[in-house]
């Protein structure tokens, strides 16, 4: 009874093993000789178990046969599993079990297993040499020598079954290839009949061997000399290579898919126990990686862009398996690189469209290579029905990179321990290539903000570049990329912090601190921080190279800006002195730099050394004759010397090159007012209003931009603010007009006010500087109308400016001036007080308030306000003159000194302040 029970248990285990073997082999056919042998042995093993009418001796023999057969099939199934999953370290132990079970005593199967394990272990230890095409020698590689000896012995004995003999030939081909004997390797592949192999009804490990055999044959053909080959033979050999690569790629992908099925399909025992499926951990090795990648790499290397792109897209459509995830990441990154660097947007075709005939003709083909050499059993691919299809080259590249970035960041090695150093460097290299390509793609659309805010997971609040920081400790390039993306997207505080970290990583590199200083000066006005950052570069001395003059220039600009901000005269003079000192050092280090010469000239102009400023400015113009700011500064210097006509001529030449620059046009208005009259200057104001309307009052987003999910960066306005009243008023009474001036003025004012009420500030769109420009145009026109004695038109201009910014200190100042002209001193003082509350350092506001106080009899308070105006702007000659008048009214002896200072400053006063020239890097 116990013996019968034992036999039934063995029978059940044997059936489970048979099912397992079926999964590894596929659906076995009874017509196959190997299958027939298998079923005969199975029949001999099972038949005694069901016979109960034999004697005890027969039952003992049957039990022994069943146990022997079960052990044999269990070991053979385990061998095939280890060969399929590349677990070569387990092969020697399994060979010992086969020896102990006296299995395969009459052939060299066990020797074949040992040879394969030794060879594969040797290849895994020398992947770097294989990638560099460095031949391996038997003298330096004992495992290779043993494997080759075993394989030669097997072939000499000839005791293997045909399929195992073919495996030995393929392994020997691999040995010859790694030794550099490419002809012998090709010959072994031919002896094995690799071209006649079928992918049907084969164990999974043979799919891997088939993929490696095809790639070995293709690589061997590629490595052979071509000097004596004719063009026809060379073309035929190239076609053979490509055919081998395509077959290798398909076989490799099919191997990974089939392997994934066997690992993810749980057995009945696993299902009952509830244990999880073990993770798939297969090291593909050099030859399997080559089998997967050689096809598209060969096409791209030969300049076949269309076919290489087609092959990459074809591989991306293959159903993913866990063993192919790393390969898919590589393919996605390569395809994105090809799209961004080799394909123009006009030549793009989407992935679901057939390759254009023009591209195939350029590659010298009529059809894609995979259509010309179809596989007998291609890998399974995804269906394209209802799938999303990119519309342009950047969209497809960014989509690929987002997928790759998600995989790269998820697989990143965070550990800093020495044993994980190699894996960590590899993951960082992968992530770096992805982020570099992502930066290129986003930069094409101007989407720097999206780059710094990307998140492939909706629940993840961190941008992708910030996510990269978790595995980028002391990795300068990724930190630098993050800093540049923050800088380009206007996140200035974060950019400075990141660039400071970059400067700490590479103290010898002057670029990060100078970039951080640039952000501090141009956007944040963190002048002391900028001086500190530039000081790091100065401390490098000659090691800073060409950046040393730029560091001194940075310090000089900071000191100049600090002088403008200083409230005490002593501090202002000290900062101006330091600014000149640093700028002269910079010029001495690089006399040919036009930017340094320009800023030295500007600093000399700011301290009213007008004549001295001409020389460095001339040097700057000699190098860069069409520089906007240099020509504008030249205009201001000429106006400071009272050469108004020359200044206007220079300005007109500059406007020919920069006709849309509003800063130049405001200077032109001032020069025309000084040279001619306010009426002439008003014509320029009218032109400025027309220019503003034509430049900003239109719809930026065109219809073709809607086709892409990654639109270009929109312009300043995205919707037309219709109905803006952008013409200068004219309330003057005409000589022959039938309407009276008051009635005409009232009607026009009512119309203007109705339009103002409809178009409030809530309808403004776009950046603030656009509307600031419009406000300045209205205020400038208002000042000209006041100078021309036309107060009603001036009042209208003030109302238009007030509609844009009701609490603007400039609007309040002009309103106060108009109230003062109307004789309403109380209202004027109230408006001046409100303007001062908004802008306490506005010297023009202080000047008007001080003059009003002196005129209304409050001399003491007026004197105090005028002194404040001088403290804010000590080169304002009008403030000095008004202070002299206030002191003279009190009989003070200081009045003459004030008048003399005013005359001296007025003699070097430009038509507009020198501070309108931007001081930035």
Image (cartoon, grey):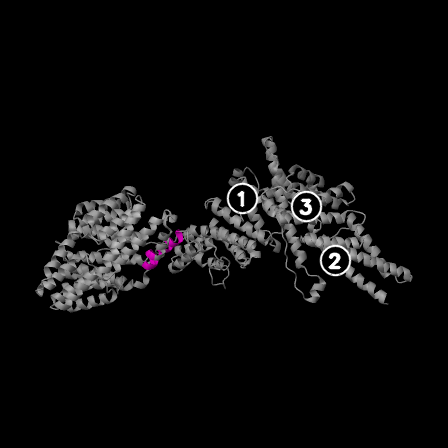
Task: Calculate the distance from the C-alpha at mark 2 to the C-alpha at mark 3.
Answer: 39 Å
Question: What x and y, as percent, mark residue 358?
Answer: 51, 40
- Seen at 73% across and 42% down, the residue is 152
Indicate which disc, 2 or 3, sits on the residue closer to the N terminus.
2
Circle 1 residue: 355
- Seen at 60% across and 46% down, the residue is 290
Q: In this view, does 2 lie above or below 412?
A: below
Indicate which disc, 3 or 1, sits on the residue closer to the N terminus.
3
How would you rate the neighbour count of disc 2 (Cα within 10 Å): few for under 14, some for 14-19, many for 20 or more?
Answer: few
Task: Calculate the distance from the C-alpha at mark 2 to the C-alpha at mark 1.
Answer: 45 Å
Please state which of residues 219 and 577 is positioned toward the viewer in this rendering.
577
Circle 2 residue: 19
Q: Given this view, does label 2 or label 1 mark the residue nearer the observer?
A: 2
Instruction: Reply yes or no: does residue 639 show up in magenta.
Output: no
The region drawn magenta spans 510-531
Q: What element carries label 3?
A: helix
Q: Is residue 921 visible?
A: no
Q: Is mark 2 on a helix, strand or loop?
A: helix
Question: What x and y, as percent, mark residue 95?
Answer: 75, 52
Task: Calculate the distance from the C-alpha at mark 3 to the C-alpha at mark 1.
Answer: 50 Å
Viewport quadrant of the N terminus: bottom right
């Amino acid at each position: 009874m116990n013996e019968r029970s034992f036999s039934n248990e063995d029978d059940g285990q044997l059936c489970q093993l048979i099912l397992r073997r079926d999964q590894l082999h596929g659906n076995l056919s009874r017509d196959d000789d190997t299958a027939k042998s298998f079923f005969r042995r199975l029949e001999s093993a099972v038949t005694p178990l069901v016979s109960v009418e034999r004697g005890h001796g027969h039952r003992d023999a049957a039990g022994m046969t069943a146990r022997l057969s079960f052990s044999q099939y269990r070991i053979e199934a385990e061998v095939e599993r280890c060969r399929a999953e590349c677990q070569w370290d387990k092969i020697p132990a399994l060979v010992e079990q086969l020896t102990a079970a006296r299995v395969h005593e009459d052939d060299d199967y066990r020797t074949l297993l040992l040879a394969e394990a030794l060879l594969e272990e040797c290849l895994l230890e020398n992947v770097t040499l294989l990638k560099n095409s460095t031949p391996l020698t038997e003298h330096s590689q004992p495992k290779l020598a043993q494997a080759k000896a075993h394989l030669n012995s097997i072939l000499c004995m000839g005791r293997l079954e045909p399929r195992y003999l073919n495996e030995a030939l393929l392994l020997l081909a691999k040995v010859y290839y790694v030794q550099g004997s490419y002809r012998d390797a090709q010959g072994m592949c031919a002896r094995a009949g690799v071209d006649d192999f079928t992918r049907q009804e084969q164990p999974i490990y043979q799919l891997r061997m088939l993929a490696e055999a095809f790639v070995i044959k293709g690589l061997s053909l590629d490595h052979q000399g071509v000097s004596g080959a004719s063009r026809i033979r060379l073309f035929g050999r190239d076609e053979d290579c490509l055919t081998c690569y395509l077959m290798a790629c398909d076989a490799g992908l099919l191997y990974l898919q089939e392997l994934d099925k066997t690992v993810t399909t749980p057995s009945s025992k696993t299902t009952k126990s509830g244990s999880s499926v073990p993770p798939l951990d297969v090291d593909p090795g050099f030859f399997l990686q080559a089998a997967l990648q050689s096809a598209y790499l060969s096409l791209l290397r030969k300049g076949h862009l269309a076919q290489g792109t087609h092959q990459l897209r074809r591989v991306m459509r293959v159903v993913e398996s866990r063993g192919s995830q790393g390969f898919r990441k590589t393919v996605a990154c390569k395809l994105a690189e090809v799209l961004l660097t080799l394909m123009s947007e006009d030549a793009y075709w989407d992935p679901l469209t057939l390759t254009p005939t023009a591209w195939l003709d350029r590659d010298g083909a009529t059809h894609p290579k995979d259509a010309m050499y179809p596989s007998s059993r291609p890998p399974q691919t995804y269906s394209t029905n209802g799938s999303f299809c990119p519309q342009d080259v950047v969209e497809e590249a960014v989509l690929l990179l987002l997928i790759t970035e998600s995989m790269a960041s998820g697989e990143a090695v965070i550990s800093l321990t020495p044993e994980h150093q190699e894996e960590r460097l590899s993951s960082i290299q992968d992530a770096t290539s992805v982020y570099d390509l992502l930066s290129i793609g986003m930069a094409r659309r101007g989407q720097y903000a999206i780059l710094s805010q990307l998140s492939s997971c909706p629940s993840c609040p961190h941008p992708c570049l910030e996510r990269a920081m978790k595995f980028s400790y002391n990795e300068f390039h990724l930190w630098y990329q993050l800093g540049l993306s923050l800088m380009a997207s206007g996140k200035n505080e974060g950019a400075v912090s990141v660039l400071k970290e970059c400067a700490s990583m590479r103290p010898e590199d002057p670029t990060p601190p100078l970039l951080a200083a640039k952000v501090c000066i141009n956007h944040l006005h963190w002048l002391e921080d900028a001086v500190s950052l530039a000081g790091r570069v100065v401390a490098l001395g000659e090691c800073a190279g060409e950046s040393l003059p730029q560091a001194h220039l940075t310090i000089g600009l900071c000191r100049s800006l600090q002088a403008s901000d200083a409230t005490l005269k002593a501090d202002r003079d000290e900062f101006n002195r330091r600014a000149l000192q640093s700028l002269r050092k910079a010029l001495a280090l690089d006399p040919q730099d036009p930017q340094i010469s320009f800023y030295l000239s500007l600093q000399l102009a700011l301290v009213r050394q007008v004549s001295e400023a001409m020389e460095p400015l001339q040097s700057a113009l000699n190098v860069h004759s069409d520089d906007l700011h240099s020509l504008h500064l030249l205009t201001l210097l000429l106006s400071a010397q009272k050469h108004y006509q020359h200044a206007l001529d220079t300005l007109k030449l500059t406007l020919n090159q920069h006709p849309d620059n509003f800063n130049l046009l405001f200077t032109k208005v001032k020069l025309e007012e000084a040279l001619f009259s306010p009426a002439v200057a008003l014509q320029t104001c009218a032109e400025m209003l027309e220019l503003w309307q034509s430049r900003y009052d239109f719809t930026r987003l065109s219809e073709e931009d809607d086709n892409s999910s990654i639109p270009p960066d929109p312009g300043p306005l995205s919707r037309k603010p219709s109905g803006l009243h952008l013409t200068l008023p004219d309330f003057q009474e005409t000589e022959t007009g039938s309407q009276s001036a008051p009635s005409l003025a009232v009607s026009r004012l009512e119309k203007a006010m109705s339009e103002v009420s409809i178009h409030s500030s809530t309808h403004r769109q776009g950046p603030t500087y656009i509307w600031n420009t419009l406000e300045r145009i209205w205020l400038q026109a208002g000042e000209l109308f006041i100078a021309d004695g036309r107060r009603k038109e001036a009042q209208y201009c003030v109302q238009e400016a007030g509609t844009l910014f009701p609490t603007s200190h400039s609007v309040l100042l002009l309103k106060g001036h108009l109230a003062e002209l109307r004789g309403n001193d109380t209202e004027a003082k109230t408006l001046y007080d409100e303007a001062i509350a908004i802008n306490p350092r506005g010297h023009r506001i202080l000047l008007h308030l001080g003059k009003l106080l002196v005129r209304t009899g409050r001399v003491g308070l007026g004197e105090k306000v005028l002194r404040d105006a001088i403290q804010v702007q000590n080169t304002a000659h009008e403030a000095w003159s008004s202070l002299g008048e206030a002191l003279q009214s009190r009989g003070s002896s200081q009045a003459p000194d004030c008048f003399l200072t005013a005359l001296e400053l007025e003699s070097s006063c430009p038509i507009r302040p020198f501070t309108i020239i931007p001081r930035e890097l």
